[in-house]
Image (cartoon, coloured by chain):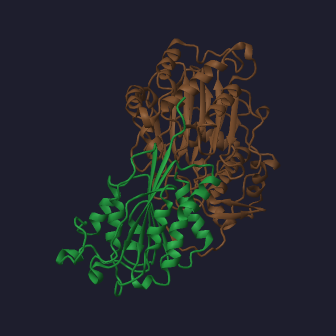
Chain colours: A brown, B green
Amino acid sequence: MSTTTPSSTSSPTPSEPEPAALDSPQPAVPDSPTPSQAPIEPGSQNPPLVEIWAGDGSPDIDPSTLPLGTAAWMQEASAGKGEDARPLVLRHPDREVYFLAVLDGMGGAGAARHVVGNQTLTGAAIAARACARAIEAWFQGSPAEAWTSVLAGDPAPLTAALQRTMDTLPAAFERGTGSLIKSRMIKRFPTTLAAMAVERTATGSSAICFSAGDSRCYRISNAHGLQQLTKDDLRDDIDPFANLGDDGVLSRMISASEPVRLTASRFPDGDGDDLYFCATDGVFHYWQSPMQFAYRAMRILIDENRPELGGNLAVRWAAGLRAAVSPVTADDHSLAAVLLADSTQSPATLGREPAFVYLLRRLHDCDRLERRTDLAALQRIWDAYRTNYCAYLATGTP
Amino acid sequence: MGGQLTYAVDIVFCIDTTGSMGELIAQVKGHATAFEQELKKVMDAKGKTIDALRVRVVPYRDFYADGGAGWNPSQFFTLPKDNDSFRACVNSLAADGGGDEPECGLEALVAAIRSDWTKTGDKRRQVIVLYTDASSHPLEKAAASKPTGYPDDMPANFNDLTDLWEGQTVNRSGKRLIMFAPDAKPWSDIANHWTNVVHHTSKAGKGLVDVDYNAILDVIANSV
């Protein structure tokens, strides 16, 4: 795999010109939705928005309902009080192209509570779920526009779909409370988004990421192990290791308080035997360092990539990582993944190449270190490792 | 695999104890002493734990009317170990003096910002909670002549104070300023221009309804 840096762009604010779409082959896709796939109608009483709450009450995701080679989970830190949306895993009807998305309602900024059916939910939870539902409905209702634009790296149509949703939420859920609170920290219906369109290409694989906030897209490859593809939208420029302690303040998220803006970035140079995933911060933000998270994600891949285990490697990897994340995190966590390989059944070559094994051995040295006692040692390892981990963040997103 | 990251939270209460607070001071004292328990309750509900919690009190009046009377910033109390001492400190506060508004709330804010913040914990949160029913003298006023008891080394003006808040003295990401204060200068300017501020526009939290209080606690709890 080359080390080409990604090209990136942002969706427009009303005062900005439309960005040029990243050039990409235009895939042929089906065009007409079935009646049951109607998109959300802005300005309606939003029955689709209400419908999704029932499904979100039982977050466990049955792997058999997902496309082969994909996996997803969502787990709430406190049952019934989660603010992540159920992750999205969509497959193109005719091609080996996938769309993954996770959304994390921003509870600090969107703590206002609203009545939804017989429940009371925060604006953050509503935002994440409504946006997830809107994206799914967009792919169902306008599949040609959806698949074509995401594969072209054009954030404008996805941005517009999310903006329409944000435009409907205040009227649908806000009731006058006469709050006396004034704060720039508080947003109406705030959520993050990390999404990626992943496709197998003639030479390997490519991904196009769309993001706002601090949920992330990642890739695991034989040549480079785990790499973070998207840069967090933080007010200050804090690297991923420092940010585990600093918890940088977000400079951007999706909300009804400001125009929706997404960052789009293309990563064209996958090996072809790669694991791509999107994750909310509950998955990666509670480890002692990015190296520990990388080590677990890669180690589990090797451990699970054994022919005798059978089944779907992506599902086994996700289950293993979920089991590792759960005791570490203090937050809701959700993940959507796709394994591109010659076969989604073992044996895939991912994790079996010497470069991957070498990298894993280097990371093993820091697996038991802790920030409170070994910060200097962790910093030294991070200084050596971050060039690889952050290769795609060097030029960053705008 | 390393263990869970640890959380250390410092809370500083700046409390206006001038005479006009007479009818509110009992409510504020109850509010301050219950705050950490209320915050813990919200965090427990979210499955989050504070590993180390300290609180400090900065009572203030009006140096221009009272000299240094009532100015007695406390050290940090470690909770729950020092809970009795913390409660005794808060309960000893009495509303008195101050003359007409404005008071010296900005000087209290400076003292709070310059607290000896914790250096423990993997993740640190620094929360200042201010209660007042009045506006504040501008810091520039002390340039002409410092009143008796006026603290040394105060910022010369509001811009310098803003730099203090936005600089390295407080954790840039982990800081929060919660103001229960009227919609008046300088509090409205702070709410409009400083980062990480929540302003409940009221006289020291008077009329604070549960929905707003919960929203404020959520803003803090969700950042931990």
Percent from the top left, x then y, of residue B192? 41, 68
Q: Nearer the viewer, residue A104 or A338?
A: A104
Q: Is residue A33 above or below residue A173?
A: above
User: In the orientation shown, which residue stands out farthest toward the right?
Assistant: A35
Percent from the top left, x then y, of residue B140? 23, 74
How many numbered marks does the figure carry? 0
Q: Quadrant of residue B54?
A: bottom left
Q: Does residue A304 show up? A: yes
User: Which residue is drawn at the image coordinates 29% and 82% (left, top)?
Assistant: B66
Q: Quadrant of residue B115?
A: bottom left
Q: Does residue B179 show up? A: no
Percent from the top left, x then y, of residue A27? 64, 33
Q: Nearer the viewer, residue A379 or A47?
A: A379
Quarter holding the C terminus of chain A is top left
Q: Is residue B21 above or below residue A111?
A: below
Report the side of A373 relative to B145 (left or right): right
User: Which residue is drawn at the image coordinates 54% and 35% (left, top)?
Assistant: B3
